[in-house]
């Protein structure tokens, strides 16, 4: 059964713009229609953990807002846990949890446990169910050490764990996560990913996750949706996308001295900045190790980093190659030793 | 229906209690701010005393009678100011995305915003109202019959509802303007001042506006005519002097309507 569905979901905003300064500008305004979401269709089954990614302004947040009942769509229909969020906001609200990574829903000045108590009353969770749920969540999320600490004193990682618990207290079958790892350090990010995977696996919570961090998706999701300019441009497995587009790597090398672009077979120098050069290569053509040794052979190498492809790069490549999005099932063995994909279905 | 009301009441009280306890963590700050509000509003009271130092009466009203108006008006406004902080900060809620959060919760937007911001320092103004009303009652020579006591209590309740409705309508407008409109302040803070003086001192148009459109005359002036047995130079039907609760409920319904429209607009356009 599909827990989250959308058919041709659309959102058009009317933006008013003052035509000119002065008094006339106050009266006469140009109305411009901005299409934030242009016909998004998706279907997410029970227990799936889906990554919803795309560049800034692609329409991710607007989609989430329509699915959670915050915004009314301009067209199309959504269904969450079997209900239309545009028509039945209150009932949908009982069945979903929403985590906004950038803004907490916890009460800043109160101990964490007090926020949970308040949410229990807002969501009308019966006392026994609440205590059972709280015990499970505080075990899984390891909240014990800071349950009685005011939220303002929590670290960002602790607060995010608190926010996760807050969103799950009423045992929703669906969880929306908008940038849940934003601002977290590497360790805290890894922790949150692990916890999300565990909650998805153990409690069967259906999750839709937006993120800017491709690593979130790689480590968590089996399937991802890429949205750009308000349209879904890819819906399929993560392996397939990596196979097709994640093939490119960039090695950033810091040389001892500024030098003309290096000439290495299979490598394109995309940028030069003084002694620093960006070398792009396809993993099917060569390996990072070969590139690095080729560099070392022709110049003195001081430092190097390997850049993972950003979401923007993948979107660019999808446009450049004009590849038809394919559904999952056609994935190759695009896994390498660098990435660990949690399989959690 | 009753269970639902009870559930709302409990949620409201818990949300408010949580804020009060959070604010009481900073006790010195709370005391200083309350005292500050008391002093700030005290200037209004001093203004009235100064006016009567110069003139024996105002449109036929004596100092105790005007003090009575001021007391009732300040209390009603003070209660609304205490209760409706959430509506006053709606602009901030929209800008920070907190209002999106309100929409993701299984409760009405009205009750959630109502419960979202209660600043206990605002009791400073209420203390001021109590002082003024106490002074007025001790100076006045009123025989407090049960109907008069009832009209006074209902006037305080109705006045609170009328001012609260203005806060709500002002907030509803914020859904379109995002910024809190200065026009709202004219009717809230300005309204509090307006109801401290007898209506006959204002021009005809203003009086009519504040009787039939924004019913501030029902906060203190009209009930005071009844309680103090004063003649009405404006010749309004005497029934209006005890009609405050009905008018307040009608105004509240209008405010609720405006609120629902505003929320619908927000859900259509986003922030």
Image (cartoon, rainbow, N blue to C red):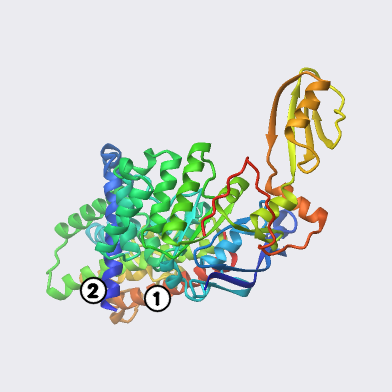
Q: Position of residue B210 (x, y in %)?
A: 42, 69
User: Label 2's element?
Assistant: helix
**Residue with the mark numbered 2:** B226
Chain letter of disc 1 in the image: B
**Which residue is depicted at the point 32% across and 82% down?**
B237
Asked whether A70 or A284 is in front, the reply is A284
- State left or right for residue A213 relative to residue B137: right
Number of dots carrying numbers = 2
Q: Which mark is residue B253?
A: 1
- State left or right for residue A67 relative to residue B201: right
Asked whether A173 or B62 is in front, the reply is A173
Q: Position of residue B14 (x, y in %)?
A: 28, 58
User: Label 1's element?
Assistant: helix
Q: Position of residue B167 (x, y in %)?
A: 41, 62
| Image-quadrant location for residue A237 | bottom right
**Which residue is depicted at the point 35% across and 64% down?**
A123
């Amino acid at each position: 059964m599909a827990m989250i569905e959308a058919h041709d979901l659309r959102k058009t905003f009317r933006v008013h713009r003052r035509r000119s300064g002065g008094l006339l500008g106050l009266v006469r305004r140009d109305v411009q229609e901005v299409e934030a979401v242009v016909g998004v269709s998706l279907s997410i089954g029970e227990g799936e953990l889906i990554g919803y990614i795309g560049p800034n302004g692609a329409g991710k947040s607007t989609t989430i807002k329509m699915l959670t009942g915050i915004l009314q769509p301009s067209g199309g229909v959504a269904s969450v846990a079997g209900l239309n969020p545009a028509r039945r906001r209150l009932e949908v609200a009982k069945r979903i949890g929403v985590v906004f990574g950038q803004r907490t829903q916890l009460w800043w000045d109160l101990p964490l446990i007090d926020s949970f108590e308040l949410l229990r009353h807002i969501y009308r969770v019966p006392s026994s169910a609440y205590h059972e749920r709280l015990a499970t969540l505080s075990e899984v999320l390891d909240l014990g050490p800071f349950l009685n600490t005011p939220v303002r004193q929590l670290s960002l990682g602790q607060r995010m764990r608190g926010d996760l618990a807050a969103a799950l207290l009423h045992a929703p079958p669906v969880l929306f996560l908008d940038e849940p790892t934003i601002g977290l350090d590497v360790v805290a990010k890894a922790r949150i990913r692990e916890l999300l995977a565990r909650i998805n696996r153990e409690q069967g919570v259906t999750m839709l996750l937006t993120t800017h961090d491709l690593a979130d998706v790689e480590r968590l999701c089996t399937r991802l949706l890429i949205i750009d300019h308000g349209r879904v441009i890819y819906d399929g497995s993560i392996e397939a996308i990596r196979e097709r587009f994640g093939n490119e790597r960039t090695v950033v090398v810091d040389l001892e001295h500024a030098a003309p672009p290096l000439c290495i077979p299979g490598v394109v120098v995309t940028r030069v900045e003084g002694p620093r050069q960006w070398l792009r290569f396809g993993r099917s053509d060569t390996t990072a190790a070969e590139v690095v040794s080729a560099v070392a052979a022709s110049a003195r190498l001081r430092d190097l980093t390997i850049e993972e492809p950003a979401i923007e790069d993948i979107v660019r490549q999808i446009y450049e190659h004009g590849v038809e999005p394919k559904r999952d099932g056609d994935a190759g063995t695009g896994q390498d030793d660098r990435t660990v994909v949690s399989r959690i279905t | 229906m009753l269970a639902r009301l009870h559930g709302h009441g409990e949620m409201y009280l818990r949300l408010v209690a949580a804020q009060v306890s959070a604010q009481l963590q900073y006790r010195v700050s709370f005391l200083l701010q309350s005292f500050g509000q008391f002093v700030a509003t005290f200037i209004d009271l001093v203004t009235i005393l100064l006016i009567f130092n110069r003139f024996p009466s105002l449109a036929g009203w004596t100092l105790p009678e005007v003090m009575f108006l001021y007391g009732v008006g300040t209390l009603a406004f003070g209660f609304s100011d205490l209760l409706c902080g959430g509506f006053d900060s709606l602009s901030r809620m929209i800008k920070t995305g907190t209002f999106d959060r309100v929409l993701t919760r299984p409760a009405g937007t009205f009750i959630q915003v109502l419960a979202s911001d209660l600043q206990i320092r605002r009791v400073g103004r209420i203390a001021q109202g109590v002082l003024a009303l106490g002074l007025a009652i001790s100076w006045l020579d009123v025989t407090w019959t049960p109907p008069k006591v009832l009209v006074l209590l209902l006037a305080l309740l109705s006045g609170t509802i009328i001012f609260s409705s203005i806060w709500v309508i002002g907030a509803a407008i914020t859904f379109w303007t995002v910024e809190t409109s200065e026009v709202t302040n004219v009717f809230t803070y300005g309204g509090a001042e307006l109801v401290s003086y007898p209506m006959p001192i204002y021009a005809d148009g203003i009086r009519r506006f504040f009787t039939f459109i924004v019913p501030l005359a029902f906060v203190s002036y009209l009930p005071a005519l009844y309680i103090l047995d004063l003649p009405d130079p404006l010749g309004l039907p005497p029934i209006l002097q005890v009609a405050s609760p009905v008018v307040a409920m009608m105004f509240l319904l209008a405010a609720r309507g405006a609120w629902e429209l505003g929320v619908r607009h927000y859900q259509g356009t986003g922030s």
